[in-house]
Amino acid sequence: MQIIDVKLSDLKPYSKNAKKHPDKQVEHIANSLREFGWKQPIVIDKDNVIVCGHGRLLAAKKLGYKTAPCVYADDLTDEQVKAFRLADNKTAESDWDFDFLTVELDGICDIDMTQFGFDLGEDEPEPEEDPDTEYDDIDKMETHYGVPYQGNKSRIADIIIHVLPEGERLVDLFGGGGAITHCAMLSDKWHSFLYNDLNEMITGLFIDAIYGKYHDERRVITRAEFNDLKDTDAYVKYIWSFGNNGLAYLWGKDIEDEKCEACHALLDEELHDRRLAFVHFLQMLRESKDKAPHRLATLERLQALTQLEALQRLEALQRLEALQRLEVANIDYTQYEYKDGDIVYCDVPYEVIGKGKCDDYGLNFDSKAFYEWVHTRPYQVFFSSYEISDDTFYCKKIKDVMSLIGATTNGQKRTEYLYSNMPFED
């Protein structure tokens, strides 16, 4: 058996792979690769299509690896390859002898086995059921894409990337927080990328995150600091604002003190400072317990910490060769000039039906003018939205999602669609 290193960009997932790899499993595989290294190669056919090892490929991409050890199954017929692919997954299924398993787990002290999917008694929340099934077989490469920003497409980025056709360059014309660009750079569908948005602060935040500016970020921003810095500091403006809209401070006045103190208890650099903050935080909770019992749950949703973690994860893109082929621009969509091989995607502000425009988030976007622009393009343009007033576009349902922010949609379950001025590929 000859093992050779192959570039991840040269490996091709099998389009009809019947084995699913949910996010949690890919995370466990990635943890195993990180802890133990490559101990099992990926099996590929003569055309570099994966026979066995789709999960290992996803995990390697998640870790930012450039190559993977592979074995060619070039001695098998096409029918044997199909049979082996299914047999490999089926024969790996078996039950545990839980008596022996318990003994073995008890004998492991210095390695956290939960990172590989073993349940050691911790209670985990049940995942929310999703009625959509059409794209359930698409594996999510990251848990979060792009920087936290209003209307972030992180929840459906994998589906959009799956539906968009292959080409030379992906053009993310309304790039926003960069979720689509981030997801696209982790895929192998395009050679280069154009990430564009009129908002120079948000594109700057995205690029700064990639190059590690926020790797050691520990600031806890108060309301006064937010108001002072939001016009000059993109981190303050978007990470510490409600709904990442850059307008209003993250927390209400009645809970901001406890929230900030809790953040200090987790973020302060010195252990002594973190301990003092934690003691102060508990004291604040005790004092407010009788007046507002619900405030005891103030640690449950420290959004700033979750958003900071998402920002810091972007640093992994530095290790990708695709970063060298990323172009950033800040032009109006009408100024874009098409190049052969471009795949053009637009995450436009969503139209308020009856108005023909979007006035959420303080924007004033003319939806009907945008639709007219799309109709007059001699090349294919894709854009995502909820239901729109123009029924002349080709349309494909993406997913039912909860609208998180917006003057008219907050908290509602809405259907996300992908629209185009030309037919979708089969």
Image (spheres, rainbow, N blue to C red):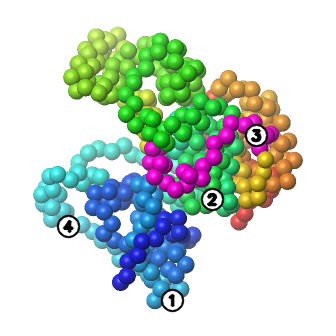
Q: How many C-alpha atoms fall within 10 Å of the one at disc 3: few (<14), some, or many (≥20)?
A: some
Taking the image as drawn, is residue 172 in sight?
Answer: yes
Mark 4: secondary structure: loop
Could you say which disc has been placed on residue 190 in the image? 2
Label located before the other in sequence (3 or 4):
4
Residue 341: x and y, percent?
Answer: 73, 59
Residue tagged 3: 333
Q: Is residue 332 magenta?
A: yes
Q: Is residue 215 above or below residue 97?
A: above
**In the figure, 344 relative to 371: above or below?**
below
Residue sitting nearer the eye, 50 or 324? 324
Identity of the residue drawn at 55% across and 48% down: 182
User: Taking 47 as reference, is 285 above or below it?
Assistant: above
Q: How far apart are labels 3 and 1 at the CA level?
A: 50 Å
Quadrant of residue 248 within the rendered picture? top right
Q: Earlier in the sequence, mark 2 or mark 3?
A: 2
Tell me the kind of residue under disc 2.
Trp
Q: Secondary structure at mark 3?
A: helix
* Magenta extent: 314-336
> What percent of the width, then of the height, locates residue 87?
41, 79
Q: Is residue 185 left or right of residue 89?
A: right
Label 1 vs label 4, nearer the camera = 1
Of the two numbered discs 4 and 2 on the same chain, state the one appearing first in sequence.
4
Q: Nearer the viewer, mark 4 or mark 2?
A: 2
Q: Residue at x 48, y 65 (%)?
A: 8
